[in-house]
Image (cartoon, helix red, strand yellow):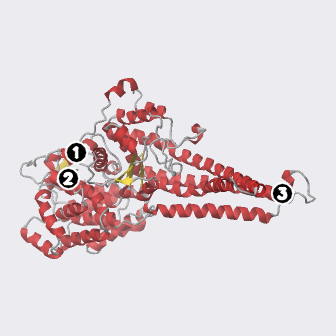
Amino acid sequence: MTFFEHQNLARRNSKVMVLLFALAVLAVILSVDLVLGALYVASNADEPIPQTLLVRLKHVPPGVYLAGAVATAALILIVSLVRTARLAGGGAAVAEMAGARRIAPDTSDPLERRLRNVVEEMAIAAGVRVPEVYVMDGERGINAFAAGWDASGAVVAVTRGTLEQLTRDELQGVIGHEFSHILNGDMRLNLRMIGVLAGIVFIGAIGEFVMRSMRGARDSKGAAGIFLAGLAVFIIGYLGLFFARLIKAAVSRQREFLADASSVQFTRNPDGIAGALDQIRMMPGGALIANRHAEDMSHMYFGESVRIRLGGILATHPPVDERIRRVNPRFQPSAYRPKRDLAPSPGAQAAAMVPPQEQQGRRAGDLAQGWGRTPAQGAALVGTMEAGNVDFAVRLLNGLPAELREAVRDAEGARAVILALLLAEPQEALKRQLDAIGPTRLVERARAATAWTRRLGPAYHLALIDLALPAVKAARPGDKEELLVAVEAAVNADRRVSLHEFVVLALLREQLAPAAGRPAGTRKLAELKDAVSIVLSLVVQAGTRADATGPREAALMAALRAGAAAMGMPELVPAKSALTLESARGALETLRELAPMQKAVLVKGLFAAVTFDGTIRLGEAELMRLVGAVLDCPLPPLLGSLDPATLAA
């Protein structure tokens, strides 16, 4: 399935989860009413009513059952709403629940550095923003999870056991598995499950608290009654726990097989994830998590985080042996284990700069490649990592100057590098930008960074921004605002904004001031024609040139008609009003509201427009990736067959 189909499937799974949740709530309410009815009968045993318990329960006043049902439903709803509200912070809130610590981009720990390198490689290969990285220091088992409301706001967390017990290839296999959850829309569903299921599990916690509080009570007769009531509530709570686990198992298990297979596709190394699973099988603690929220988050982890009886029915993950067999049927532990190397390698950050090479006098922005794909096949690239993309990402990272890799690890350096990417090269244009921004320490550092950024072509820009964003996101609110103001001033200094400049600014705004818990889109293209027209016109104007068939105006119209036809909107016309920064920003923000399959149609139309001449230029490819980043439709490197050494300006 494509990225958009996975997103759509996740929505359908959400509806299944809601239905199962409603049935679970009904079962818990009936159980509570049964206990209340029995307590009422026991307290009125002297009344002259028939002796059969079932008949006695029928004579319980309806108000008792109604009160029990209302109180139980209200308690479940309130707890679920409170937990959901606490998860508004997305992945960071889940990491806090798990007791995880954020790994700073400039960490000097070699194991943590290796983890960040692997995550950065995967993110750039997939075209998603580099997730924040966390470690659960107190957990010795081998486990990991990805969490967030969308791909742009994801976090990846691993246990200390994962860092210490796995080789780099095995770690890459685990991270590849988690990136599948990021790309396939699983994270939003996982967060909803934590919030929704919290209510039906909470009742059992009340019963357990009541039983503990009655131990050692002086009034043994009264305490015994309260203890029994607590025991009944505790048993009811376990009924809720049973249903919660059943819901998680129904929704999660097949997704784990898919994520394992995706990891092999990403890394092209089945031994990596198979070896990680083999280590879980070998370790006494396996993948178990000691944190008190391990049960709440069990469906999110890489491996089974809690011990579960009736595992075949309630397990959120398939058996480890079955997972290994599926990813690598020929895996032989006896031959594999002796070859494992736990020593952390320095990774991409130690590589030297790849010298820029000239392409027969052409600039990198002019490099073109035969496309050879239909618009639909282009749209199908969203959310994928084709064979070789990770290798390309590693080569791209190796092509960055060591000074830049070092600079983006702290907030001040990362802000300066992002601003440097937008500073113009001609001195006159640069002077206008500097006058517009004003003298600040940020500007001085950005000017110094241009010595390195100007050696990089467009293919490096998105990767460098992605590397810088984690450090910038962790900066003080005032520093983030200063960067946004400076970038906007630099972009507007010559009163002429290129589309590349605009989408970089839009991406920064969306990343540094995201909407918390943004609802999933439901709109259709036909409802948003004006916004579609604006974005299509922008992309067409940025990528279309005059050719042998006629002047640029004719080529523009032909490309626009091709894009409109691919969207099934032949009536679409160029944007009616002048294309401005504000109109373009509003159009992109509006198009984020599209339903997943409607986004697929939009991206197909954009590909049809930019590849109308049968080729895709480097500038067009990176523009499509930037637009995809703003729309939360991650595109992998589109010109991955080119050597990064040829992509320098």
Per the model, the C-alpha gap separating discs 2 and 3 is 73 Å
**Which of the two discs, 3 and 1, labels the residue nearer the N terminus?**
3
- Residue in the foreground of this view, choosing between 40 and 23: 40
Disc 2 + disc 1, Cβ < 8 Å: yes
**Which of the two discs, 2 and 3, labels the residue nearer the N terminus?**
3
Per the model, the C-alpha gap separating discs 3 and 1 is 72 Å
Residue 624 in sight in this render: no
Q: Position of residue 297 (x, y in %)?
A: 50, 50
Residue 252 in sight in this render: yes
**Which of the two discs, 2 and 1, labels the residue nearer the N terminus?**
1
Disc 2 + disc 3, Cβ < 8 Å: no
Query: Which residue is pictured at 31% across the width and 35% down the height?
Result: 342
| Residue at the far top in the pictured view | 334
In the figure, 293 relative to 553: above or below? above
Query: Which residue is pictured at 86% across the width and 54% down the height?
Result: 55
**Quarter of the image holding residue 28?**
bottom right
Please name the residue that numbered disc 3 is placed on.
Answer: 41
Query: Which residue is pictured at 46% across the width and 37% down the height?
Result: 286
Please name the residue that numbered disc 2 is placed on.
Answer: 405
Q: Nearer the viewer, mark 2 or mark 3?
A: 3
Amino acid, disc 3: Val
- Residue 348 image label: 1
Q: Position of residue 582 (x, y in %)?
A: 29, 73
Disc 2 secondary structure class: helix
Amino acid, disc 2: Arg
Amino acid, disc 1: Ala
Q: Position of residue 583 (x, y in %)?
A: 30, 72
Q: Position of residue 368 (x, y in %)?
A: 17, 50
Q: Residues within 10 Å of mark 3 (few under 14, many from 20)?
A: some
- Residue in the foreground of this view, choosing between 594 and 446: 446
